[in-house]
Each structure stands twice: as structure tokens, then as C-alpha cells.
Amino acid sequence: MAAGRKQTPMKVNEFGLGYLFWFGLVCSGGALFCVFVSFASPYWYKSWSRVHSPIANIGMWEVCLSGWVKPYDPRMNAYVGCWWIHSTYFSDVWDLIMPPWFRAVQALVIFTLLCNIASTALLVIAGFFQLITQKHFGTKEKRFRLHMVIAILLFAAGGLVLITALVFAMKAKDPNWMPRPWLCYFSWSFGFNVISGFFSAFGGISIFIKSTEIRKKEEKGDDNIDRRAGIPLPPIQPRNDIPFYPKEPSEQDSRNGDTASVTPSKHSESFV
């Protein structure tokens, strides 16, 4: 029974994406998710719930105040409630709530989000194209350049996250920005931004290694596929059924005196 059972050859997918590609895609998607949550949520900087602080919580685009008063304001006008940070409600105190370093952090977060969107989109497009069509995405040189661009985007996103985290962590504790900073702490939105940087760094390393692997890898042919599948290659045997006919002397050979090196054939001997 075992002898009559057909053995199916092992399937080898020469157009597989590889573990490095999938790991880089997961890291890029995780970085995009984390930075989007950090971008949209208003909990970068938050006050402790059991103490009274002029600020409730602050994000990149929303600020919640609970009695914040502009320094040296003779009218003692208190700002209360949650508002869009560019609202006209803060028209008199825009420079105090959004100093230059805070605007720079906003710009860096936007660039980080764009880098993560671009890297994830390129990875998804290349992966789906290769899985659906079972063909490589362009030539080997184009694939190498594509993966290098994705790796650069991920490294850039990780670098921007590092700069953003350092600047915000140092400047948010400045009492000239918000009073009583010892009553506040960095909340989960800030943490999501930091986590996105780790995702971007690991994804960039993975895609960079993948690009060097593509650069060094030779183009695969059918023989290599059969060898990886465990299919033995047929031995090369000489062909004995093809008759050998010696070269007839040409006019050029007779001029050069090479007629003596040519032996007569069997057909010529039969007519003698």
C-alpha cells in the first residue's frame, strides 16, 4: 500500500515575502496605530485627579483647563473647559498656550504620522502585488530601492519620535508654560507616541536587513526550485543517436594547407 501511494512534491513558493517582510509590516502598522492614537488623543499631559491644578489635560490639538489664568492679567480672566487648541477662545493667550517649542512638536508629530502612513502603504502595496500576482514587484534593483526607501521612512519616523519625546518632556515641566508642573504627569497619549518610535525602529531594522538580502540574493531559476523541493535533477547523458559528420574541407582551408588534417568520411569511401 505504501509503495503504490503517490508522493506529491513539496511546494516551494519562490515569491514568498519572508519573515523579515512580515515583521517589518507588523511593526510599521503598529507604529502607525500608536502615532495616530497619540496624534488624536488629548492626554499627553495630565494633572493628578485628586489635586487641583489649573490644567486638566493637554494634547496636540485639544486643551482642557480648569481655571487657568493668564499671568499678570489685571482682569483675572479664568479659562475653563475643553477647547480646540486653535480656537478663538484662546486668541489672547495663543503664544502662552502654544509657545514655539509646542508648535514644533505639533509639526514633528505630523511628519511622523506621514512617514508611518507612507511606509505602511508601500509595504501593503508591495506585499499584495507579490501575493496576488505571484511575481516580484519589479526587478531586483527596484525591489532593493523600494525596501531602502521604506527603511529610511521608518528610521526617520523613529528619529522624529525621539526628538518629539525629548523636547516635550523637557519643556512641559517648565513652570513658565503651565503653573505647578509637579501636579501633572505625562499620560498615555505621550506613551503611545514613544511606543510608536520603538515600532518604527524595529521595523526599519527589519526592512533594511530585507533590502540587503534582496541585493545579495541571486535570481532563482527552475533548477534551484527543484533542488529546494528535494526533486533530484536528471543526469546528463551523451546523445549517441546523432551521427558525426566530419567537417568538409572548405576553399579557405585548402588555401591555408589544412586539407591534410581532415579525414575522409564513410560516405566518401563508398564511392571510391
Image (cartoon, rainbow, N blue to C red):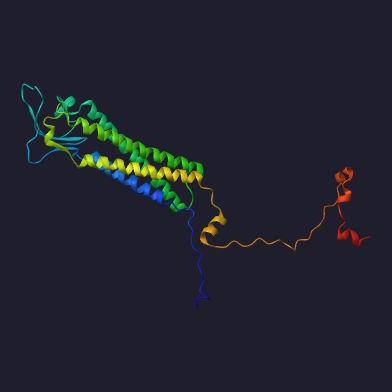
Query: Quick check: can you spot residue 141?
Result: yes
Task: Report whether 74 appears left or right of 257.
Answer: left
Looking at the rendering, in which quadrant would you find the C terminus?
Answer: bottom right
From this view, report whether residue 87 is shown above or below residue 19: above
From this view, report whether residue 104 is shown above or below residue 268: above
Residue drawn at the location 36% of the way across and 40% of the way down: 154
Residue 2, position as x, y percentages in the image: 50, 76
**How many numbered callouts?**
0
> What is the residue that sits farthest to the bottom in this orientation?
1
Residue 119, position as x, y percentages in the image: 37, 41
Residue drawn at the location 23% of the way across and 26% of the way down: 100
Residue 209, position as x, y percentages in the image: 43, 44
Task: Report whether 116 appears left or right of 148.
Answer: left
Task: Report whether 141 appears left or right of 248.
Answer: left
Residue 157, position as x, y percentages in the image: 33, 37
Q: Is residue 238 or residue 142 the one in the foreground?
A: 238
Residue drawn at the location 37% of the way across and 38% of the way down: 153
Q: Is residue 141 or residue 180 the one in the foreground?
A: 180
Query: Quick check: can you spot residue 139?
Result: no
Q: Where, by quadrant of the figure, is residue 241 drawn? A: bottom right
Q: Where, by quadrant of the figure, is residue 203 drawn? A: top left
> What is the residue that sits farthest to the right in this orientation?
272
